[in-house]
Image (cartoon, rainbow, N blue to C red):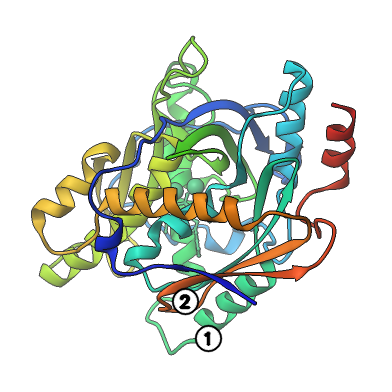
Amino acid sequence: MALTFPVYPPARYAGESEPVKRPKEFACFSYDKNHQFRFNDSSLKWYYPPDIGADLSHGSDTFVKHDDSIDEHLDSLLRTIAFHERKTGEPIDAHVVTWRGMLTKIMATPFDDEGFEMNATLYRDCIFIEEHHAFKQQKKQLENNRGKQRTPPSLMQFWGYKFETLSTIPRPWGETSREYIESRDSEIVNNKEQYCSVVRTGFGKSIVCLGGEVDAIWDAKPETPGDPINWVELKTSAEIRNHNDQFKFDRKLMRYWIQSFLLGVPKIIVGFRTQDGILSKVEEFKTMSLPYDVQRRGMAKWDGNVCIKFTSLFLEWLRLSINDEGVWRIRRQHKSDHIELFKVEEVGHGDIIMDEFMDWRIKL
Ligand code: A3P
Ligand code: MG
Ligand code: MG
């Protein structure tokens, strides 16, 4: 039998806001150009403004694309956590461990129709949550096949990565040559390479450990670990030409805000493009003031505090509900007014927790 958690009405989650912790990075890892895992920050990039007028389609024929049909589970995140625990000699204190993308979906739920499926398992007082990979693949297939779009989804996706390549440099400003900066348009776009930040954060009573990709840094990491980092999130979006475009963009800003809020990314830089993928304008947004800016315009109706409170109460409910071993499914069907939770495997932890991590934890 499934347990359910109500999504609506958002007013249920209004009122006094829940205490949140500022996310603090305590570890990081990188994937290199071949998607090989590295216990370091070697794939970190620095922001450097792109040239306006660039063609975001340029180089799409040589795109080196990561194969996302393979289910990577939580493996890289768990490896990084184990590495950190080996250094400190004690387990992390999180109640929940997951990728940032999973909490983005949960946080957006009160104002979004999107359906999702995740797997969760309890191991030593901590809930580990992964994406239900087969569901995601199926959903993507359906979306790709839906109707005839002006621009193929694959090209649109390339524009996002191309913008990242045009807006970043692999070393700090002072150490990068003018030649490199000016030749960024001919760099091969490769989304196998990533820098991932691993943070400790909190929602209400729940301590959460999240891993997620960060696109770039503005200057340098602070000397004191745990101090805020000047991360930059890069996004592309269609130019805003009228009221309706502004409404759509304000809705999109909710996801940008959630995604950045979760890892403590203070600045979002949006590359606006024409219908044909020409970069026409670059604009900076402050993560912290986004919810108020959108509310002031009064078009898109979303409330950051409701997203936070909803997530706090959901995690509290999840921690009460997942109380023994096995694998649980967290499911929200498209437009549904509730999130369901039911068991899919009676014992064990499925493939959520890799053996290497369990072997390590047994020793601890
Ligand atoms: P845009 O966000 O500019 O469209 P992120 O912004 O999260 O760093 O992701 C970088 C790019 O990856 C996106 O650029 C988009 O091209 C692609 N991408 C991210 N999430 C995606 C998704 N759910 N479906 C398709 N493409 C996605
Ligand atoms: Mg990114
Ligand atoms: Mg981005």
The crowd level at tag 2 (other Cα within 10 Å; few <14, some 14-19, many 20+) is few
Q: Is residue 209 left or right of residue 111?
A: right
Residue 36 vertical placement versus 230 (above, below): below
Under circle 2, the secondary element is: loop
Mark 1: which amino acid? Asn
The crowd level at tag 1 (other Cα within 10 Å; few <14, some 14-19, many 20+) is few
Mark 1 vs mark 2, foreground winner is 1
Q: Can you tell which quarter of the image residue 94 is in? A: top right
The quadrant of the image that shows the C terminus is: top right
Relative image position of residue 132 (x, y in whole percent): 66, 66
Q: Can you tell which quarter of the image residue 68 is in? A: bottom right
Q: Reading the chain from its start, which is encountered first: label 1 or label 2?
A: 1
Name the residue that disc number 2 marks. 152
Residue at screen point 23% across, 45% down? 290
> Residue 305 versus residue 29: which sits nearer the camera?
305
Identify the mark at residue 239; answer none if there is no mark.
Answer: none
Relative image position of residue 128 (x, y in whole percent): 67, 49
The answer to whether residue 163 of the structure is visible from this angle is: no
The answer to whether residue 157 of the structure is visible from this angle is: yes
Name the residue that disc number 1 marks. 145
The quadrant of the image that shows the N terminus is: bottom right
Ligand 1 within 8 Å of the CB at mark 1: no
Residue at screen point 70% across, 61% down? 67
